[in-house]
Image: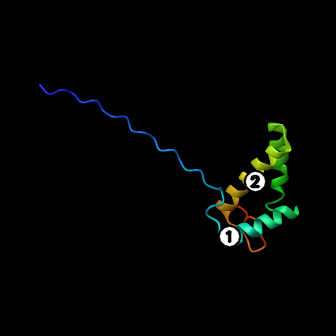
Amino acid sequence: MAKKRKKKKKKKKKARKTHPARGLSKAARSRLVKRARKGKKVSKGGFKKVMMKAAKEYGSLEAGRRVAAAVMWKMAKKRGVTKKGTIRRKKK
């Protein structure tokens, strides 16, 4: 009788971390960042709302800013950026 072979366990590859705005062009990212740093509305005033809510949850304003930035980049990648530097609105 033939002996049974033990199956080798496959190692899972770790996903490579990338910037959330990787799919956007450099010009679009630049327009969006400039507008956000000036304090202008980026997407219906949502950045400040998300930032304050996250700051309350995580206990610091800096953490809230990081969370809001990640959300902003994800929305920008999904919806796209206009010529003005704002995130496009949802399609109905």
Q: Of callouts 2 and 1, which one flags the residue occurring earlier in the amino acid sequence? A: 1
Q: Residues within 10 Å of mark 1 (few under 14, many from 20)?
A: few
66 left or right, relative to 19: right
| Residue 37 visible from this viewpoint | yes
Q: Nearer the viewer, residue 55 or 84?
A: 55
Report if the CB atoms under discs 2 and 1 are less than 8 Å apart: no
Residue occupying image coordinates x 82% and y 46% = 62
37 left or right, relative to 77: right
Q: Is the residue 70 above or below the residue 22 in the image?
A: above
Q: Amino acid at mark 1?
A: Lys
Q: Is the residue 18 above or below the residue 2 in the image?
A: below
| Residue 50, horizontal then vertical, whole percent | 80, 48
| Residue 55, horizontal then vertical, whole percent | 83, 42
| Residue 92 visible from this viewpoint | no
Q: Which residue is mark 1?
A: 26
Residue at the farthest right position: 39
Residue occupying image coordinates x 82% and y 60% = 44
Instruction: State the SS at label 1.
Output: helix
Residue occupying image coordinates x 45% and y 41% = 12
13 left or right, relative to 45: left
Q: Amino acid at mark 2?
A: Ala
Residue occupying image coordinates x 18% and y 26% = 3
Q: Which colour style is shown?
A: rainbow
Instruction: State the SS at label 2.
Output: helix
Residue at the farthest left position: 1
| Residue 1, horizontal then vertical, whole percent | 11, 25
Quarter residue 80 falls in: bottom right
> Spatial distance from mark 2 to mark 1, Cα to Cα?
17 Å
Q: Nearer the viewer, residue 77 or 22?
A: 22
Q: Which residue is mark 2?
A: 69
| Residue 75, horizontal then vertical, whole percent | 69, 57
